[in-house]
Image: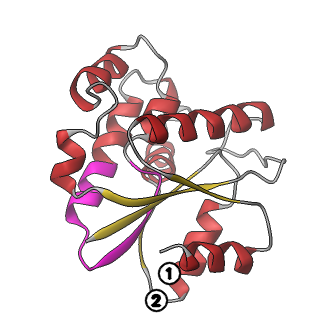
Amino acid sequence: MKKYVLTGGPGSGKSSILIALELKGYQVIREAAEDYIRHQQALGIREPWLDEEFQKQIFWLQHTREKNAKGELVFVDRGLFDNYAYEPEGTPFYREMANNLLAKGRKTELIKELGDYAKIFLIEHPGIVERNDVRRENILQARFLEKELEKIYTSCGYEVIRIPFAQLEQRVEEIIKNL
């Protein structure tokens, strides 16, 4: 199976692109973080990101989704390495990820077990962020996360293909052209 990751800062348009790809018949794996937040909020936990296990829960939900994916080609809304950009350095889970998942910039055994990512598409940010109950970052944070995500995937040995802000169909076509 070839897995193509769409990553980028919050509000960059990843979800819209993935819906468009799904409507074209491609298999997609939804973003684990957004689903986990909505689930926790439905249980009455208004700010689940305050839980020290938050990123760990998202990581393992994403891991399960990727492990259970079927087919020849799938688009992934945020790969496993996205957690590094969101988990504060120095927390126990960050140290666990650093110790167990990254070995001197090489791709990890976990990623190899899941099937390496074929390509990483960094969806460039349009410059505005619509905040809501799930998306809490502002534009400065979104831009910072975009840079961190590129740095993380590059340090793991992936080529990062930047998809500039444009009309939705243009972005989708650019991704398909680069498969």
Q: Which residue is pictured at 31% across the width and 22% down the height?
A: 98
Q: Residue at x 43, y 36 (%)?
A: 83
In the displayed structure, would residue 76 be above or below residue 49? below
Side (left or right) of 127 relative to 50: right
Left or right position of 84 against 133: left
- Residue that badge 1 annotates: 22
**Residue 92, image quadrant:** top left
Image coords of residue 71 (percent x, y): 26, 79
Q: Quadrant of residue 105?
A: top left
Instruction: Give the residue type that dot 2 points to.
Output: Gly
Q: Is residue 76 above or below residue 158?
A: below
Residue bearing the label numbered 2: 25
Please provide percent x and percent y for residue 67. Answer: 21, 59
Does residue 49 lie above or below 6 as drawn?
A: above
Is residue 96 covered in magenta?
no
| Vertical position of residue 160 compared to residue 60: above or below | below
Q: Amino acid at mark 1?
A: Glu
CA neighbours of label 1 inside 10 A, class few (<14), some (14 to 19), many (20+): some
Nearer to the camera, 138 or 120: 120
Neighbour tally class for label 2: few under 14, some 14-19, many 20 plus, Cα within 10 Å = few
The N terminus appears in which quarter of the rendering?
Answer: bottom left
In the rendered structure, find residue 86 and report the number of the disc placed on it.
none
Return the x and y of residue 43 as percentages of the image width and height.
43, 44
Q: Separation of disc 1 and disc 2 at Cα? A: 5 Å
